C-alpha cells in the first residue's frame, strides 16, 4: 500500500502543478499579458521554438529524457481537457495510435517552413488556449469587472476597481473560437485528452523522441493481476492492459495509472539496459531528427520582407504592432495566441479576419476605429512570446514608425467649412501633423511623414466623416528622424518680469 | 474712463499695492472699499504659494466655498505625459486647491477630466490623481457615457445640447483649473477651452466650429473661480507637446471670477492679442464674461 500512497502523492503533486500552470495562463490572458516580458508563455513549445533556434532541440532533449513530460504539466490546453474529462470520470479503453497526427505535424512544419502560419496557429495548443480566453472568457470577466466597478462608484467608492476597455473582437472569430471549444469540450468529456493524442503537433513532435525515453512508466516484474484498472483511467487511451504495454510516445505522464494500480505493478523509472532500439524506433528517431532540424531551420528563417507602402489614398495596408519589425516577421512568427490583444490597454489590437489574407486569420492588426496606439505604452511588445513582436524599451518605441498618415485636404473641416479644428495635430505626439497658416486666422494640418509614427491618434481624433486623415501600414517598419533640438535641452526659464496688462 | 474715475482708480490701486506689503490686508482694504477684485494675477512663486496669495487677494477661498458644499475641480489632465511637459495642470497647484477647499469646509472635493489619451494613464502619469488623493479629494472617472447628461445651453449658437458630466450639474462650487498652453487648433488654450473636458462628445465641438462651440459651452456653467496655471507654459507644439524644450518656466498664475477675463489676461501673458483668439472674442460678445480687465478689477501680485 505504501507504494500506492506514494504514487498517489506524486500524482497529486503533478495535478497541482498543472493546475497552477493553467491558472497562471488564464490570468495571463485575462489581465497580465502586458505587464512584463518573459514568464511561462515564453517557455511554451511553439513560441519558444519560433523565438529561439534552440527551442526545438531543448524540447526534443526533454522527450528523450522523460517522454512527454512537457504535456504533463506545461500545457494549459491539455490540463483543460483533463479537467473536463475528470468532471464526468468516463472510463477509457485502449485505442490504436492515430496516423493523422503525423500528417498534421508534417503539414504544420512544411507550411510554417514556407511562412504560411495558419495551420500552426490553428493547431498550437498554447495559441488555441489563448484565443479561447481572449475571445470567450475575457469579455465576460471584463463585463463583470466593469459592472462591479460601476456599482462601487455609485456607492462612492472610487479607484478600488477601474473599468477596463473591451477590445474589439470580430463576431466571426468569437463564433469560430466558441465552436472549437464546444467540440473540444464534448470530445474531451468522453475521451480524456483526445486533442493531445490524435491531433496536437507539439505532442506528436515530442512523441517522435519518446518511443523509448530514459525514464517512463513501465510494468514491473510479474506483479500485474490483469485487472485492467490502468487502462480505464488513462486519458490518452495509450495503455493496453491485455498486452501489458504503455505506448510512451502517447503517454502524457498524468500518473493516474500509477496511482490506481491495486497491485503496485506500475512504476516510473529508468529503462533497462537491454531494451534495444527496434527498426521502427530507428525510423522514428530519424523522422524526429528531421522534424527537429526543420524546427531549427524555421527559427533561423531570415526576414525577406520587401519595403512597401500604400500607393494611393484608396489603398490601405494593414498595420502590425510596434516591435514587429516588418509585415513578414510579424505574419511568419505570429501564432495568433492573442496575448497582445489582451495586453493592449487601448483595446486597439484586434484579431483580424482578412487583413493578412487567408494565411493570417486570427493574426492581429491595429484598428484605430476605437482608439489609437498610446505613445507611452509598450504592453504588446512585452506580451508577445513568439518574437512576432519583439520587446521594446519605451524610448525605442517612441521612434518606430509602423505606418504613415495621409492627409486629404478636401475632406478636412478647415477647408470644407472654413472652421478651425486641428484635432489631428492636437493628438499627434511627435507633431508630425502640425497646423500651418491657411486662410485668415485659420490653420490647416500638414503631415511630415519623416516624423510620423503611424500611431493613429490623428485618424481617431478626426471628427469628420469620411476621415480627412488616415493611417496606412508600411511593410517594413522604420525609424522617424531625430527632431533637431537645436536650442539645447530642458525648458526655457524665463519668469514673467511684469504683467502685460 | 474720465479723469475723475482715473484718479479714483489710481488711488485705489496704490492703496491696494501698499496693502500688499502687509500680508492678509488685501481683503480688509477691498472690503472697506466695498468691492473685491475679480481677477488676481500672481508671479514669481511656486504654484501652491501663488494660489494662496492670489485667492487671499480675491477675498479668501471662503468667498467661493462655504461649509458643507461640494466642490468640483476641472484640471486639465488630458495627456499621458509627465508634469514637466506642462501639457497638464501642475499637480502641486491642484493639490493645494483641494487642500484649501477642504480647509474651507467643503464636504467633498472632486476632480475629473474627459481625457484624450487613455484615462488611467493620464490620471496617473499627470501626477494629478495622486495629488488629489494626497490632499483628501476624490478623483472621479469620466471615460464612460453614463456619467454624462444632455443639457441645453441658453444663448448657444452651435453647441446647443451637449452631454455634460453629471458632477458639473450636481456640484455647489465649480473651480476650473486649466493650464496655459499653445494649441495647434484653437491657437491657445486656457479656461474656456478647458471646459471641453466636461463634455462627452468632444468631436462635436471640432466638427461644429471649434471657437463658436467653446464660447457656447462657456455659457453653460460659469466657473465660480478659474485658476490658470502658467507656472510652466508650453509655448509651441501644443496642446500635447513633444519635449521639455517646448516649455517656458514663467512662474505665473491667474485667478479670475470671470472666465473670459481670465483667458484675456492669459492670452496677454502668452503674448497673443486676445482679440485674435476666436473663442475669447465670441465668448465676450455672447456674454460669457468680459474682456475688459479694468471692469473686473485686477490685483497684481509679485512674490
Image (spheres, coloured by chain):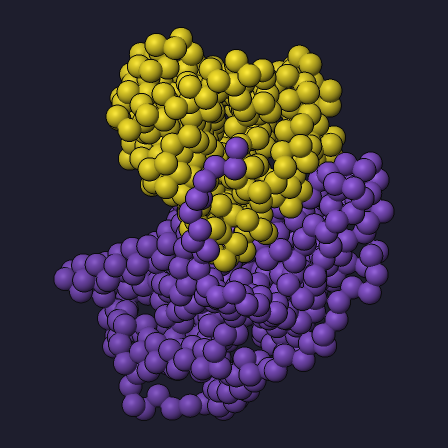
Residue nearest the observer in this picture, A407 or A353:
A407
Relative to A16, A72 lies left or right: right
Q: Which chain is purple?
A: A
Residue nearest the observer in this picture, A83 or A477:
A477
Question: How many callouts does the rendering have?
Answer: 0
Looking at the picture, does residue A413 appear above or below residue A329? Answer: above
Please state the horizontal and vertical placement of residue A42, each as a whole percent of the image.
Answer: 43, 67
Q: From where the camera sits, is residue B137 visible? A: no
Looking at the picture, does residue A86 appear above or below residue A279? Answer: above
Relative to A81, B186 lies left or right: right
Please state the horizontal and vertical placement of residue A80, each as a whole percent of the image.
Answer: 44, 53
Residue furthest to the left: A2
Question: Residue placed at 39% from the left, 24% from the top?
Answer: B14
Question: Residue placed at 67% from the left, 18% from the top?
Answer: B286
Q: From where the camera sits, is residue B87 visible? A: yes
Residue nearest the observer in this picture, A470 or A34:
A470
Looking at the picture, does residue A202 appear above or below residue B53? Answer: below
Query: In the picture, which quadrant includes the N terminus of chain A?
Result: bottom left
Looking at the picture, does residue B135 appear above or below residue A135? Answer: above
Please state the horizontal and vertical placement of residue B94, each as a whole percent of the image.
Answer: 38, 34
Please state the horizontal and vertical placement of residue B284, each as a whole percent of the image.
Answer: 64, 22
Relative to A316, B162 lies left or right: left
Question: Residue placed at 52% from the left, 37% from the top?
Answer: A500
Residue nearest the observer in this picture, A496 or A203:
A496
Q: Which quarter of the picture shows residue A356?
A: bottom right
Relative to B270, A66 lies left or right: left
Q: In the rendered image of this protein, which colour is used for chain B?
A: yellow
Question: Residue placed at 50% from the left, 58% from the top?
Answer: B245
Amino acid at each position: 500500500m505504501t507504494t500506492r500512497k506514494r504514487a498517489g502523492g506524486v500524482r497529486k503533486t503533478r495535478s497541482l502543478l498543472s493546475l497552477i500552470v493553467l491558472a497562471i495562463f488564464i490570468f495571463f490572458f485575462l489581465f497580465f499579458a502586458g505587464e512584463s516580458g518573459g514568464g511561462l508563455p515564453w517557455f511554451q513549445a511553439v513560441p519558444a521554438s519560433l523565438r529561439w533556434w534552440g527551442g526545438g532541440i531543448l524540447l526534443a532533449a526533454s522527450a528523450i529524457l522523460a517522454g512527454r513530460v512537457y504535456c504533463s504539466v506545461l500545457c494549459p490546453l491539455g490540463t483543460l481537457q483533463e479537467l473536463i474529462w475528470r468532471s464526468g470520470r468516463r472510463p477509457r479503453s485502449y485505442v490504436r495510435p492515430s496516423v493523422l497526427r503525423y500528417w498534421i505535424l508534417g503539414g504544420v512544419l512544411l507550411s510554417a517552413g514556407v511562412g504560411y502560419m495558419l495551420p500552426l496557429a490553428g493547431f498550437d495548443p498554447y495559441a488555441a488556449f489563448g484565443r479561447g480566453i481572449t475571445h470567450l472568457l475575457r469579455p465576460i470577466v471584463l463585463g463583470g469587472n466593469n459592472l462591479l466597478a460601476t456599482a462601487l462608484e455609485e456607492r462612492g467608492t472610487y479607484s478600488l476597481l477601474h473599468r477596463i476597455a473591451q477590445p474589439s473582437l470580430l463576431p466571426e472569430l468569437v463564433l469560430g473560437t466558441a465552436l472549437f471549444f464546444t467540440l473540444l469540450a464534448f470530445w474531451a468529456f468522453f475521451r480524456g485528452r483526445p486533442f493531445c493524442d490524435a491531433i496536437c503537433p507539439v505532442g506528436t513532435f515530442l512523441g517522435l523522441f519518446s518511443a523509448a525515453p530514459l525514464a517512463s512508466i513501465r510494468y514491473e516484474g510479474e506483479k500485474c493481476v490483469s485487472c485492467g484498472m490502468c487502462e480505464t483511467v488513462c486519458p490518452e487511451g495509450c495503455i493496453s492492459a491485455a498486452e501489458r504495454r504503455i505506448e510512451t510516445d502517447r503517454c502524457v505522464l498524468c500518473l493516474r495509472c500509477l496511482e490506481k494500480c491495486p497491485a503496485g505493478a506500475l512504476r516510473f523509472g529508468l529503462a533497462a539496459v537491454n531494451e534495444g532500439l527496434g527498426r521502427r524506433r530507428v525510423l522514428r528517431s530519424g523522422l524526429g531528427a528531421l522534424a527537429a532540424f526543420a524546427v531549427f531551420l524555421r527559427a533561423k528563417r531570415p526576414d525577406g520582407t520587401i519595403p512597401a507602402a500604400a500607393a494611393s489614398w484608396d489603398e490601405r495596408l494593414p498595420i502590425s504592432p510596434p516591435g514587429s519589425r516588418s509585415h513578414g516577421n510579424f505574419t511568419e512568427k505570429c501564432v495568433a495566441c492573442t496575448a497582445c490583444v489582451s495586453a493592449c490597454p487601448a483595446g486597439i489590437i484586434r484579431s483580424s479576419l482578412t487583413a493578412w489574407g487567408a494565411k493570417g486569420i486570427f493574426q492581429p492588426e491595429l484598428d484605430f476605429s476605437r482608439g489609437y496606439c498610446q505613445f507611452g505604452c509598450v504592453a504588446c511588445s512585452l506580451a508577445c512570446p513568439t518574437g512576432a513582436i519583439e520587446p521594446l524599451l519605451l524610448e525605442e518605441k517612441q521612434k518606430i514608425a509602423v505606418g504613415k498618415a495621409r492627409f486629404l485636404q478636401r475632406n478636412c473641416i478647415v477647408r470644407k467649412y472654413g472652421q478651425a479644428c486641428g484635432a489631428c495635430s492636437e493628438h499627434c505626439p511627435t507633431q508630425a501633423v502640425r497646423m500651418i497658416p491657411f486662410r485668415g486666422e485659420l490653420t490647416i494640418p500638414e503631415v511630415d511623414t519623416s516624423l510620423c509614427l503611424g500611431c493613429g491618434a490623428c485618424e481617431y481624433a478626426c471628427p469628420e466623416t469620411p476621415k480627412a486623415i488616415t493611417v496606412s501600414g508600411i511593410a517594413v517598419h522604420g525609424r522617424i528622424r531625430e527632431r533637431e533640438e537645436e536650442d539645447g535641452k530642458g525648458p526655457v526659464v524665463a519668469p514673467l518680469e511684469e504683467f502685460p496688462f | 474712463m474720465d479723469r475723475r474715475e482715473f484718479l479714483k482708480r489710481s488711488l485705489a490701486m496704490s492703496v491696494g499695492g501698499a496693502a500688499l506689503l502687509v500680508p492678509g490686508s488685501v481683503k480688509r482694504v477691498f472690503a472697506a472699499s466695498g468691492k473685491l477684485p475679480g481677477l488676481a494675477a500672481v508671479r514669481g512663486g511656486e504654484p501652491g504659494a501663488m494660489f494662496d496669495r492670489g485667492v487671499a487677494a480675491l477675498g479668501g477661498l471662503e468667498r467661493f466655498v462655504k461649509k458643507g458644499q461640494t466642490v468640483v475641480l476641472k484640471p486639465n489632465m488630458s495627456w499621458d505625459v509627465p508634469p514637466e511637459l506642462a501639457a497638464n495642470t501642475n499637480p502641486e497647484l491642484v493639490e493645494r486647491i483641494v487642500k484649501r477647499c477642504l480647509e474651507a469646509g467643503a464636504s467633498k472635493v472632486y476632480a475629473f477630466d474627459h481625457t484624450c489619451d487613455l484615462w488611467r494613464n493620464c490620471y496617473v502619469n499627470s501626477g494629478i490623481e495622486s495629488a488629489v488623493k494626497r490632499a483628501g479629494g476624490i478623483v472621479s472617472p469620466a471615460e464612460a457615457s453614463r456619467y454624462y447628461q444632455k443639457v441645453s445651453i441658453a444663448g448657444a449658437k452651435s453647441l446647443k445640447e451637449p452631454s455634460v458630466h453629471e458632477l458639473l450639474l450636481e456640484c455647489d462650487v465649480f473651480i476650473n483649473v486649466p493650464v496655459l498652453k499653445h494649441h495647434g487648433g484653437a491657437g491657445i488654450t486656457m479656461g474656456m477651452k478647458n471646459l471641453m473636458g466636461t463634455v462627452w462628445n468632444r468631436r462635436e465641438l471640432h466638427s461644429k466650429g471649434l471657437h463658436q462651440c467653446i464660447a457656447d459651452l462657456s455659457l453653460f456653467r460659469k466657473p465660480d473661480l478659474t485658476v490658470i496655471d502658467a507656472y510652466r507654459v508650453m509655448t509651441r507644439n501644443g496642446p500635447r507637446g513633444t519635449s521639455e524644450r517646448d516649455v517656458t518656466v514663467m512662474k505665473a498664475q491667474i485667478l479670475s471670477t470671470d472666465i473670459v477675463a481670465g483667458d484675456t489676461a492669459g492670452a496677454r501673458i502668452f503674448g497673443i492679442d486676445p482679440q485674435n483668439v476666436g473663442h475669447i472674442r465670441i465668448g465676450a460678445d455672447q456674454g460669457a464674461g468680459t474682456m475688459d480687465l479694468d471692469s473686473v478689477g485686477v490685483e497684481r501680485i509679485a512674490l
